[in-house]
Structures are given as C-alpha cells and as structure tokens.
Image (cartoon, helix red, strand yellow):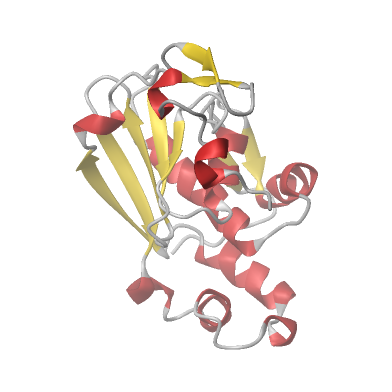
Amino acid sequence: MKKQTDHTPWCRDHKGTVYTFEEYFDFMKDFHGYPAPGLIIGGRMVDIALERFPKGTLFDAISETSYCLPDAIQMLTLCTTGNAWLNVVDLGRFALTLYDKHDGTGIRVFLDPGKMKPWQEIMNWFYKLKPKPEQDNQLLREQIKAAGSDIFSVREVQVAPRYLEKRSKGKTTDCPQCGEAFPSNHGTICRGCQGDAPYS
C-alpha cells in the first residue's frame, strides 16, 4: 500500500490535468456543493479507469448508481448526461465503467466490500453502520486518502450492444393535448400528457 501524501496525485481528468487530494477536494466543493465521500472516492475510480485506457480512445461512461459517481465522471471526463455520453443505470452498485464508443470494450471499477474491511470509518459510512451525525467525517476522509486505490477492484468488461447504438430523438411534433413539442417516437401525445410529468 502506497501512503498518500499531500502532493501525491489523487486523480486526473481526460485532458491529463492532475489533482492532489486537496485540489480535488476544492474542485468538488465548487462543482457538487459539498465534498461528499462518494465523490472523493469517485474521483479515484475515474482515474483508475482512465489510466487503463489507451490515449486517444473515444469513450462513453456508465454509472451504476445515481449518487455521487455521475458527478465524478462529469467532472473528470467529457461524458455528461447532457451530451448523452454518460448513462446512469441505477443498479444501486457503487461502480462505474468507461468504454470504447465503437467496440464496447471497457474498464469497470467498483468499491469492493472485501477490500473495505480494514477501513472501519469507510465501512461505517458505506454500510450506514452509524447514523450520519455520529460519523467522523475527518477520519473518513483520512481513511479514504490512506486507502487510495486499495478499496477497489477492476474488471475488463464488454458493454451490451444497446449502449453502442446512436441515440436519436427522431422527428419532433406538437402534442395535440398540451401543444408543446415532443419526440414523435414517444407516442401520439407527449409523455407529460401520458401521466409521466413530475407535477401534480
């Protein structure tokens, strides 16, 4: 296990910009609003995947949770929910994959339960063994920093063909019910009028 120092690189972005733990900590606060433990860990996970990818590879990303990891991916890669290069497939697992856009070969990095066991405060946070107010945030950050890459496992994966298909909204039409424009492949009326709108 390599001890993390104040000057040890914690993660890098797709351009090769390297962040120390403290620099990434500040970056997180600016982007996410709070230096969440999952986002600290997520930065390291993205870095692990990036360093295993050949330079110049065009890649997409999958996050297997909707919490924290999508932000780490968006902060450190060109993959965002807005450009549809980031797929959030909420399986409830703390895992991410970067994969080649063309052939679907990828690197999956996940927080490994067996490897977390020596790090009690990480276990307390991840498994919610203590209520949040009773967790020691300072100790948690120190353990995340000290653990470095030791709490993850990495697998080569092949992404399912449906994630390689070019996504298109198709033609746009006006909803006969509300009058707003929507993709015609959603049906005869927009999804909002079909009952999927998030409003009462």
Which residue is drawn at the image coordinates 57% and 28% (left, top)? 82
x then y, percent, for residue 118:
44, 81
Which residue is drawn at the image coordinates 64% and 21% (left, top)? 179
Q: How many marks?
A: 0
Does residue 6 appear to the left or right of 42 in the view shown?
A: right
x then y, percent, for residue 186:
42, 28
Which residue is drawn at the image coordinates 66% and 51% (left, top)? 21
In this view, 171 is above or below 91? above
Asked if one can make out residue 181 in the rendered structure from this viewpoint, the answer is yes
x then y, percent, for residue 99:
32, 32
Q: Nearer the viewer, residue 4 or 76?
A: 76
Asked if one can make out residue 10 in the rendered structure from this viewpoint, the answer is no
x then y, percent, for residue 15:
56, 23
In this view, 134 is above or below 22? below
Q: Nearer the viewer, residue 145 or 31?
A: 31
Q: Nearer the viewer, residue 145 or 114?
A: 114
Q: Quadrant of the N terminus?
A: bottom left
